[in-house]
Image (cartoon, helix red, strand yellow):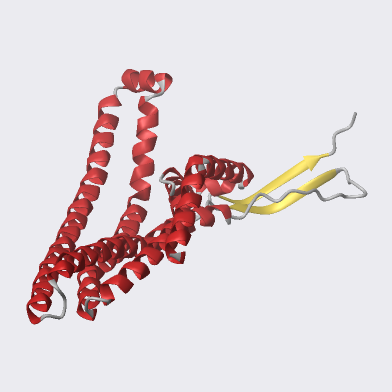
């Protein structure tokens, strides 16, 4: 009774949280945080492609509401755990083999979610650069000035082909992953159905042997199916949690980038000029120096 009441309270809190707009408000807040962080970054970092990749992955995390999903998972895990415990206690009253059978037949869901989630995160990381390129081309096509220039210069067809090719490559990889994911779930569903069939056979054997009466035959099967479904949901959410945490790390990795330093250096006595010698400049992740051995001289302005 206490478990049922606690489960209802947690579900009530979860529903209130969702209705209060946790997904919408959190998404808006995180988008503002990314915009504010972007304004505080040194301009030189925008010359680094890896910085842009990190920002793209951070925006992808926010747009897919991963952070909100992690927050809501806490309530889901709690309610699922209470349901599983209460159902298992009922199922145990029939025979402990039902519990063992139900756990073994839904455990593949956890393994599948864990492995597929890891593969999906690696895929999204590999696609980041091409996604940025695709989105850049799409922005060009939506800019009237850029479209006019492309048509005037005659390279609009080339960019269209580039956009189509990049888009097809990305979609094809996602489709291949979706097929593998679907096959994994099909295998898990097959194991679950086999387990359900085995539970029917087990209940029939127990009924024939006299361990349970005919009235408990259907009740034991129903309890087994309920444990299977609830445990399946719990294990799938638990297996996908590391994937969500990996995407959340991308968001916080962007927020942890070094910011532009603010401040000034005062010089009490300014001379007639300031001379800088042996100046060098290299773009991030670039091997060769773009500027080197420069000499700059700044003269004092007289009014």
Note whether 86 is above or below 291 in the view shown. Answer: below
Q: Is residue 54 visible?
A: no
**Residue lying at 37% horizontally and 18% vertically, measured from the top left:** 148
Query: Where is the N terminus found, in terms of image quarters?
Result: bottom left
Q: Nearer the viewer, residue 255 or 179?
A: 179
Q: Nearer the viewer, residue 153 or 67?
A: 67
- Quadrant of res 25: top right
Q: Position of residue 255 (x, y in %)?
A: 57, 53
**Residue lying at 17% horizontally and 66% vertically, measured from the top left:** 221
Query: Where is the C terminus found, in terms of image quarters?
Result: top right
Q: Is residue 34 visible?
A: yes
Q: Position of residue 158 (x, y in %)?
A: 26, 30
Note whether 166 is above or below 267 in the view shown. Answer: above
Q: Nearer the viewer, residue 238 or 1?
A: 1
**Residue lying at 25% horizontally and 73% vertically, measured from the top left:** 103
Q: Which residue sits furthest right?
A: 269
Q: Is residue 271 left or right of residue 113?
A: right
Q: Nearer the viewer, residue 269 or 119?
A: 119
Q: Is residue 273 left or right of residue 256?
A: right
């Amino acid at each position: 009774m206490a478990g049922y009441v606690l489960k209802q309270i947690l579900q009530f809190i979860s529903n209130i949280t969702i209705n209060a707009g946790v997904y919408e408000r959190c998404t808006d807040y995180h988008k503002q945080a990314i915009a504010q962080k972007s304004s505080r970054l040194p301009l030189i970092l925008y010359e680094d492609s890896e910085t842009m990749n990190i920002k793209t992955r951070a925006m992808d995390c926010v747009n897919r509401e991963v952070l909100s999903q992690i927050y809501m998972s806490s309530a889901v895990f709690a309610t699922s755990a209470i349901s599983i415990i209460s159902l298992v206690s009922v199922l145990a009253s029939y025979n402990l083999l039902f519990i063992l059978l139900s756990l073994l037949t839904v455990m593949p869901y956890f393994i599948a979610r864990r492995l597929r989630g890891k593969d999906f995160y690696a895929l999204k990381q590999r696609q980041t650069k091409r996604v940025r390129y695709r989105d850049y081309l799409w922005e060009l096509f939506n800019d009237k000035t850029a479209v006019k220039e492309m048509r005037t210069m005659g390279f609009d067809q080339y960019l269209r082909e580039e956009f189509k090719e990049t888009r097809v490559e990305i979609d094809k990889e996602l489709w291949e992953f979706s097929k593998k994911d679907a096959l994994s779930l099909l295998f898990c569903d097959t194991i679950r159905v086999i387990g359900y069939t085995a539970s029917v056979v087990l209940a029939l054997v127990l009924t024939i042997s006299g361990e349970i009466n005919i009235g408990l035959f259907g009740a034991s099967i129903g309890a087994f199916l309920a444990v299977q479904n609830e445990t399946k949901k719990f294990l799938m959410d638990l297996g996908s949690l590391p994937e969500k945490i990996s995407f959340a790390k991308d968001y916080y990795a962007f927020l942890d980038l070094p910011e532009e330093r603010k401040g000034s250096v005062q010089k009490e006595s300014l001379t007639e000029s300031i001379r800088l010698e042996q100046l060098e400049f290299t773009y991030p992740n670039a091997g060769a120096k773009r500027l080197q051995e420069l000499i700059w001289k700044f003269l004092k302005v007289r009014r």
